Image (cartoon, coloured by chain):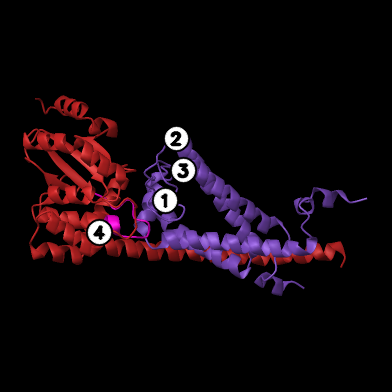
Amino acid sequence: MRSPDTLTSPATRHRIPPQWWPWCSTVARLVLAGVWAWAGVAKVGDPDASVRAVRAYEILPETIVKPFAWGLPFVELALAALLLLGLATRPAAWVSAGLLLVFVAGTAAAWARGLQIDCGCFGGGGAAAADGPRYLRELGRDGLFLCLAILVAAGTPSRLALDNLARD
Amino acid sequence: MPPQRSRYTRSRSRAWMWWVLGAVVVAAVVVGVLVQRSRSETEQAKVTRPASAVGPNGGALVGDANAPVTITEYGDFQCPVCARLHQAWGPTLDQLVQSGRVKFEFVALAFLDQGTTESLRSAAASTCAADAGQFLPYQDTLYNQQSPTENSGFLTDQRLVAFGRDAGITDNTFTRCVDSGRYDGWVRKNTDAASSSGVRGTPTVLIDGKVIDNADAADPGRLTALVAQAGGGG
């Protein structure tokens, strides 16, 4: 008889052999690192556009808008570096998940209030595309990234990570 | 390995990880704010005020300065809806301006750049054209010749200068103005001010400071009626 643990594990249901789980975790970690690197690099070149994008959500007070917009791309790049190296992986993945939840909440709030903005996720100043905002697509994308982050944060420890050097 | 020991090592290893992460994130925020603030201030320090007439929002001002009604458009030369509005309301707007009922302020913004500078450079070039006294023909050329795709590398300095010739600008001062990025800082400043005052997209049209629906702006009858209501009667 199989234990309840293996029965409920999604990896078992999809018949991914357990010895592959750390590698799945590695792939998820590297994809997430790539996402943060892309987001950070796209924003870092235009500080004024970042400020406009954050302002467009009309959530943060004007005094917080600039520090948030200026700090965010660097935090994204820092998370990318940590995840790429596999250093402090689980905390970095939890913070990634938290940040993604903040983005999801911001996008949902913009949608609910009928704002006509672009998320500015990967650069740009928050001006919606010609055919209007794409909130559903943005939320779906963030949801996908959120799954990756949770997999890295709570799943099997990944291979090819600096963290592994510190483990007995 | 007994379960207690494994749990102990796991929690210990997690503790240092959180310290590493906290330090890295705090450092990223501090460095980010310092670096980006100094870059933003450097850009905005390069502001040169245009020699030509400027409206209350920093845009190029066209028409009789004593006209009773002001129409302001926030536009981006890469924005397709702006180009469509230009076609739709152009004749009516010309008529309103020429009759002396309306002065027109066009605030050229750098809203649609995505790590590129095509909106910025075209907006700055339109300010150079205003200095050369040819703002409207230049604006007309930019909108009529607009590339169907944004940020495609279409609006090069070379092309912006060539559009100037199409619009009847023969002066070399214009070429130098475009090439040197003379009004880049001015456009950045106007773009930042527009965002601060609540402009979220282009085109945004205002009559005497009040935002009107783009559909009303594009309809000659409704536009004329709104201008009449604002005090620019028949």
The residue that label 4 is drawn on is B121
Q: Disc 3 versus disc 2: distance between alpha carbons?
A: 14 Å
**Marked residue nearer the N-terminal end (1 or 3):** 1
Callout in the foreground (1, 3): 3
State the residue position of label 3.
Answer: A134
The residue that disc 2 covers is A113
Q: Are marks 4 and 3 on the same chain?
A: no
The mark nearer the N terminus, 3 or 2, is: 2
Percent of width and height locating residue A53: 40, 50
Colour displayed for chain A in the image of the structure: purple
Q: Are marks 3 and 2 in contact (CB under 8 Å)?
A: no
Q: Quadrant of residue A33?
A: bottom right
Q: Which residue is mark 1?
A: A64
Q: Is residue A59 above or below residue B69?
A: below
Q: Which of the chains bears the disc numbered 4?
A: B
Could you give the CA–CA distance between mark 4 and mark 1, rounded to whole angstroms? 29 Å
Using residue A160 as the reference point, say whether residue A143 is left or right of it. Answer: left
Foreground label between 4 and 1: 4
In this rendering, position of residue B75 left or right of residue A77: left
For badge 3, the amino acid type reads Arg
Rendering colour (chain B):
red
| Pointer 2 chain | A
Question: Which quarter of the rendering shows the N terminus of chain B?
Answer: bottom right
Three-letter code, disc 2: Arg
x and y, in percent, of residue A5 in the image: 83, 51
